[in-house]
Structures are given as C-alpha cells and as structure tokens.
Image: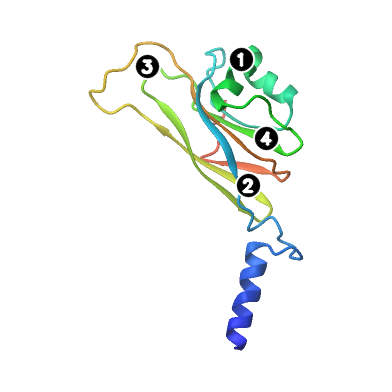
C-alpha cells in the first residue's frame, strides 16, 4: 500500500496537481484550431512567434489577419483565454513545402513547440514560385515562456 500511495503522490506532483509547485507541468494545452498558411514573402527569415494580442497578430501578418481567422475557421480570438502559435520556415524557392507543428509539451512551467518542415517528395510536381509556408495554431492561453524545437536559425 505504501508504494501505491507514493506512486500516486509522485504522479500528482509530476502532472501538476492543483497544490503542486509544478502546477503547469502536467497541463495539456488544448489545440482549438489549426491552419496551414502562406505568409507574405516580404521577410525571408523563418518566424517562430507566440501571439497574445491583436496588436501582435497585426504585426505578424499585417492586413491578412481576417484571412487567417477565416483559415482557422473562427470569427474572433478571445485574447484573455486564447493565443496563437505561428511557425514559418522562411522563404522556399518552390511550392510543395509545409510546416507541421507536431507537439506541444508543457514542462517546468515552460511550453516547448515541436515542429518540422516537410519537403516535397523527389519527382513531385511543384510550383516554381517563392513560398513562405507556415502553420498557425489557436490554443488555450499559456502565460509561461515558450521555446521552439528546433529553434529559429540566426538571421
């Protein structure tokens, strides 16, 4: 019986029971909407951003904010309870690329966003145009620090 109680206690602490100092540790961040996106090719650098306000959204996507909301299939964002995570690969010379956010991991009161860049398959027809593939997630608001894996390359 003692082992079972100890295991329950450790699981509660690891998962972040309400009274735990690691309360955020076991939190699963709920994804409310997901959209693939093509950022305007005005900035060739990859972007990894957490957007927690309408001002940050407009700074990130300019006049395309309404189109992004439509892609996410939402009318509006409740910035008090929600936020956006945006990951882009930077400019690519052809189409066929996509960004995929694969996992949101909350540990030690920090969120890690795991993502990858999918390249076109060999021989796959692609458009011959500059593209800036990205993915955007609408998620529950998280107030702690956010890290990206892999991290953005230096500009």
Report which residue position mark 1 lands on: 64
Q: Is residue 51 left or right of residue 39?
A: right
Q: Is residue 155 left or right of residue 55?
A: left
Task: Say which mark, if any, is on residue 83.
Answer: 4
Q: Residue at x 39, y 25 (%)?
A: 97
Q: Position of residue 11 (x, y in %)?
A: 61, 70
Mark nearer the N terminus (1 vs 4): 1
Mark nearer the N terminus (1 vs 3): 1
For the question of whether residue 152 can be seen, the reply is no
Q: Nearer the viewer, residue 46 or 13?
A: 13
Q: Quadrant of the C terminus?
A: top right
For the question of whether residue 74 can be seen, the reply is yes
Task: Say which mark, if any, is on residue 111.
Answer: 2
Label 1, label 2: how far apart the Cα atoms are: 27 Å
Q: Residue at x 51, y 28 (%)?
A: 35
Label 2, label 3: how far apart the Cα atoms are: 32 Å
Which one is in front in this view, the residue at disc 1 or the one at disc 3?
A: 1
Q: Is residue 108 above or below residue 115?
A: below
Asked whether the residues under the numbered discs 1 and 2 touch, taking CB atoms below 8 Å apart as contact, a structural biologist would say: no
Task: Give the structural element (helix, strand or loop) at label 1.
Answer: helix
Mark nearer the N terminus (1 vs 2): 1
Report which residue position mark 3 lands on: 94
How packed is label 3: few (under 14 Cα within 10 Å), some, or many (20 or more)? some
């Amino acid at each position: 019986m003692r082992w079972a109680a100890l295991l329950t206690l450790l699981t509660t602490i690891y998962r972040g029971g309400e009274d735990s100092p690691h309360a955020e540790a076991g939190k699963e961040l709920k994804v409310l909407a997901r959209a693939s996106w093509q950022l305007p090719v005005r900035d060739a650098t990859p972007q990894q951003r957490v957007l927690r306000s309408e001002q940050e959204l407009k700074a990130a996507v300019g006049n395309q904010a309404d189109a992004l909301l439509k892609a996410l299939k939402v009318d509006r964002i409740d910035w008090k309870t929600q936020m956006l995570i945006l990951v882009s690969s930077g400019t690519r010379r052809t189409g066929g690329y996509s960004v995929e956010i694969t996992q949101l991991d909350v540990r030690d009161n920090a969120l890690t966003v795991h993502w990858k860049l999918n390249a076109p398959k060999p021989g796959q027809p692609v458009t011959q145009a500059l593209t800036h593939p990205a993915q955007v997630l609408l998620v529950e608001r998280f107030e702690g620090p956010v890290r990206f894996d892999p991290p953005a390359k230096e500009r």
